[in-house]
Amino acid sequence: MKRLLAIILLCMALYSGIDFFLDAGQEYTCQTVTVAKGDTLWRIAGLFAAGGEDVREVIWRICGANGLKGKNIRPGQVFRVPVRMARDCYILASK
């Protein structure tokens, strides 16, 4: 029983920390974006999300890079957007 519990706890620890190890190898470059009328963080993040990447993760990176506490943005604001890099090229979503 103790062995089973130890295996379950080990699996849970590995599962919860896997994102840290997967993201640690990622490199990012920052793009600059000026907010236009009608823009939302969701839309901006969607433009820079790599194929299959969760837009919420991109929003989290934008908020972290710019010290945003809330999700309200205004036209004219300038944001740094961390964009995931793949080897020697940028991964950008198509518009």
Image (tube, helix red, strand yellow):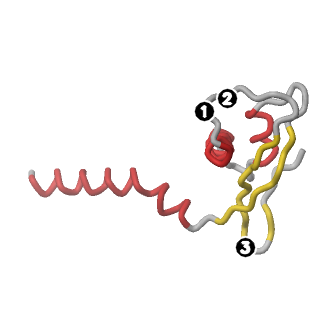
Q: Position of residue 45 (x, y in %)?
A: 75, 41
**Residue 74 figure quarter:** top right
Q: Position of residue 78 (x, y in %)?
A: 82, 42
How many residues crowd mark 3 within 10 Å: few (<14), some (14–19), many (20+)?
A: few
Q: First in sequence: mark 3 or mark 1?
A: 1
Residue under pointer 2: 71
Q: Residue furthest left?
A: 1
Amino acid type, callout 2 = Lys
Whole-angstrom CA distance, mark 2 to mark 3, is 31 Å
x 44%, y 57%: residue: 18
Name the element at disc 3: loop
Q: Left of 38 or right of it: where is 18?
A: left
Foreground: disc 2 or disc 1: 1
**Residue 6 figure quarter:** bottom left
How many residues crowd mark 1 within 10 Å: few (<14), some (14–19), many (20+)?
A: few
Which of the two residues, 27 or 49, is positioned nearer the viewer here? 27
Whole-angstrom CA distance, mark 3 to mark 1, is 32 Å
Residue under pointer 3: 87
x 80%, y 39%: residue: 44
Q: Does residue 87 lie above or below 35 as drawn?
A: below
x 68%, y 41%: residue: 55
x 72%, y 67%: residue: 86
Q: Left of 45 or right of it: where is 70?
A: left
Amino acid type, callout 3 = Arg
Whole-angstrom CA distance, mark 2 to mark 1, is 7 Å
Q: First in sequence: mark 2 or mark 3?
A: 2
Q: Position of residue 37 (x, y in %)?
A: 90, 27
Q: Position of residue 28 (x, y in %)?
A: 69, 62
Name the element at disc 2: loop
Circle number at residue 69? 1
Name the element at disc 1: loop
Foreground: disc 3 or disc 1: 1
